[in-house]
Amino acid sequence: MVTLKQLRERVAVTDPAKELEDCARHLREVSAEIAAGASPLAAWQQQYRLSPGPGICWQQQVARQLENQYSLLPAGMVSGIKAALQLIEHYGIEAVSVHDLLAENLESQAGMMTQRSSLIAGPQASARLLAWLPVAAIAAGELAGLGVVRILFATVIGWICLLLSAGLIAFGRWWSGALVREAERAGQNTGPLPAQLVAVLLAELVSSGQSPVAGLDALGQFGADRNLSRIAAQMRSRMEVPPAQLFGAEVGPLLEALRKVFESGADPQALLTHAGEVSRRAARQQIVVAAGRLSSLIVLPLALCFLPAFMLAGVVPAVLSLVGGFG
């Protein structure tokens, strides 16, 4: 028998935002251990059973453990954590601040998930509720003694109405579901690494003495992000920052910051940190816009599918019963 506690745990696991917050707390615990004097490897060994050795990437082991513990963690975030841990080891960037940055990024993504869920909950609930209108119409007709069910199943015109209504309901559910899924994708990262995380990790690399181009190369290598490697290669060969159109809007703030660094010689760390904030704000704005668009477009399947299905399943048989003597 499933206990109430087990049921609550199962429900909690299905909440991606809560899982991201739990992982963020986990990272802050590791950060506190490092701040107390432990090495990154030792701090993570207190959390997981790792087997470091020659030719063994303990950062990969940490990533796998996180994937197992936090099954709803976005793949890009797992890659980002692994890349950050490798950058700490290979480039000596400050471990405490990097772990704190990773935790902040997770908390930000959790906040965006919560915001997205709350904004689309209304239109989503409306679509689900109105999809039951035809069933409610049939039930109302039966309670009124109009014999709606008999007309639907015992007459040719009833079968036509029933099949058309079922088809409209099925198409309306698919249509409204597609609109909701599109809204749910708003603000989500589509690359191997989250854009805002790339910006702040690059800022840390620059603060440790790496050039922006070398930092991009390192992030591309350890984060398995070909776009970052391509950007670094173009910057190195052409001595200019490539346009964002070649790599997608997500990296636009990062490329704009790098362009300012190249053109004016401004402080790259400050600009890159600001680029991370701009990316985060842009993602939140995408969520708001997508939710507003959903609220407008969800009316279409309601008006063109569910309402006609309601008329065909409930109103037409009722009229036939009253006018044509089917009752």
Image: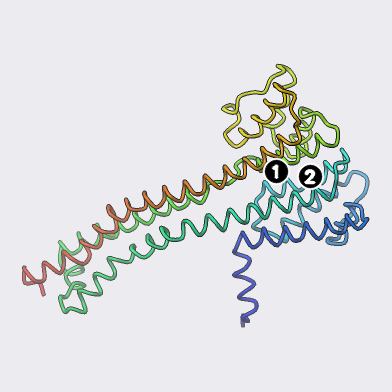
Which secondary structure, mark 2?
A: helix
Q: Which amino acid type corresponds to the residue marked 1 in the rendered image? A: Leu
Q: Which amino acid type corresponds to the residue marked 2 in the rendered image? A: Ala
Report how far apart the C-alphas of labels 2 and 1 lie in the structure: 10 Å
Q: Quadrant of the C terminus?
A: bottom left
Residue position marked by numbered label 1 in the rendering = 197
The answer to whether the residue labelled 2 contacts the one labelled 1, judged by CB atoms less than 8 Å apart, is yes
In this image, 290 relative to 88: left or right? left
Task: Name the residue rendered at 69%, 59% in the picture.
Answer: 70
Which secondary structure, mark 1?
A: helix
Q: Report x, y in % for residue 77.
A: 69, 48
In this image, 312 relative to 44: left or right? left
Q: Quadrant of the N terminus?
A: bottom right
Question: Is the residue 300 above or below the residue 93 in the image?
Answer: below
In this image, 26 relative to 18: left or right? right
- Work out whether residue 173 or residue 213 is closer to the camera in this orientation and state it: 213
Task: Name the residue rendered at 6%, 72% in the picture.
Answer: 325
Question: Is the residue 19 above or below the residue 85 in the image?
Answer: below
Mark 2: give few (<14), some (14-19) or many (20+) Cα within 10 Å: many
